[in-house]
Image (tube, grey):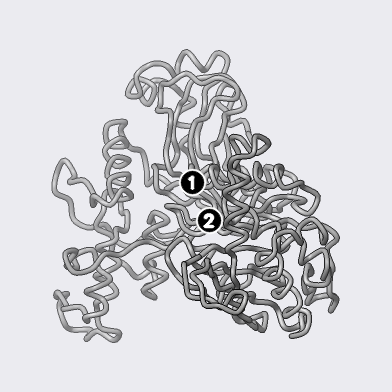
Amino acid sequence: MTTMTDSSVREFKMPDVGEGLTEAEILKWYVQPGDTVTDGQVVCEVETAKAAVELPIPYDGVVRELHFPEGTTVDVGTSIIAVAVGDGAAAAAEPVQEALADTPATAEAEEPKPEGRQPVLVGYGVSTSSTRRRPRKGAQAPAAAQEASAAIQAEMNGHGPAAPAAPAAPAAPVTGDRPLAKPPVRKLAKDLGVDLATVVPSGPDGIITREDVHAAAAEPATPEPQAAPAAVAPAPSQTAASASYDTTRETRVPVKGVRKATAAAMVGSAFTAPHVTEFVTVDVTRTMKLVEELKQDKEYAGLRVNPLLLIAKALLVAIKRNPDINASWDEAAQEIVVKHYVNLGIAAATPRGLIVPNIKDAHAKTLPQLAGSLGELVSTAREGKTSPAAMQGGTVTITNVGVFGVDTGTPILNPGESAILAVGAIKLQPWVHKGKVKPRQVTTLALSFDHRLVDGELGSKVLADVAAVLEQPKRLISWA
């Protein structure tokens, strides 16, 4: 994860913190240039497509430079922080202005990085594109360098470019090299269909800003050659997309991180696996009584005991009786892969979006062990500390929409899984019990399954078994 830029400066690269991930967003820096760091100290928090993760530095030293501000999405394998070690640590501890002016390693560290990503961990190869630092245009005084860096960081944080010390005419588009723009600006240009090579930059040092991209998007497709540059009123859709739209009427939220990954996974699942959903309404009065009894049991002291615990156990019992439901479809090999273990996913709503961590080998756990694992899973998810590994390898999932007062739903399968159970709200309703209409605790269950490998008979048996256990929880003993 590290590479040497000179004898005293180490570059710490963005690691692959999850299986096959290619990028991560820097959420927060815990250190600044000049700070002393030790081996194992957390220096920043990043968010991948699966979770938020804290990154520790692997050596002792003094922070020389943070290469990217908070909010920047960086490719795996790209250097994010420079740390002076050994003899270089003393120089890095001096004021940043002195280090910029006097330390030879600084100029060398700030030279443009070669394009392409070098592998830093076993498991992924060299990428053909990478986030790279802005190449410099000629020599620049330390003060001017700091001013340009501050302007870029202000733009990245959404405050717009900082005003230059003296008025300057817009620089001409960069020729013979990649146009100068930060990743969010490049993403904006891509979304609006704007070629950055045709954009006239107005930012310091020839940097292309968001305003430049919006201005380019608003220009006519075939401008008159003889006409002088003039402001063109953007179309309504372009106005809404620009930074100057009426924020009192609309709010735009960037789609990234967990929410972006969830959206892509759901679209892929919905249009790949043929979904079928079946429903059953069941009297769970006895299950609710059992929940109250378990809460008083000393064996469950300090554990999370609620209806979801018994619903999870009921699903595990149903899978044991119908093991073919616990499978996946291998499109490449044209095979059905039946799993002999159950990694039980529990959908959890978090501030960063919906995530589905899973309880590993849930089939082998006793009810108290399952309660402990369920409580730990939910607490970790709410704190935003769920690891990428905890969300990998799920085989079947439960989503509890009943906590929102919803009767039930038609859940979409998690990619790679064949079934997902939605649990509706448990409500007191009139129900025919022993020949009489009585108030009973009732809920509706919905099971979605992949019809490529689960037919109606198998799906119906699984759903019926779950309902039977919840109606008569003593079956947990006889069927388990």
Give me the residue at 78% from left, 84% from top: 457
* Residue 61 versus residue 293 in the image, above or below: above
* Camera sees residue 17: no
Side of 294 relative to 319 (left or right): left
Whether 140 is drawn above or below 322: the answer is above
Where residue 470 sits: x, y (%)? 66, 64
Location of residue 60 with respect to 140 vertically, above or below: above
**Is residue 270 shown to the viewer in this render?**
yes
| Alpha carbon distance from label 1 to label 2 | 8 Å
- Counting from the top left corner in percent of width and height, residue 421 is at 63, 69
> Label 1: how many residues lie within 10 Å, few (<14), some (14-19) or many (20+)?
some
Apparent side of residue 372 relative to residue 207 in the rendered image (left or right): right
Crowd class of label 2 (few under 14; some 14 to 19; many from 20; radius 10 Å): some
- Quick one: quadrant of the C terminus? bottom right
Residue 348 - label: 2
Return the mark for residue 382: 1
Reading the chain from its start, which is encountered first: label 1 or label 2?
Answer: 2
Which amino acid type corresponds to the residue marked 1 in the rendered image?
Arg
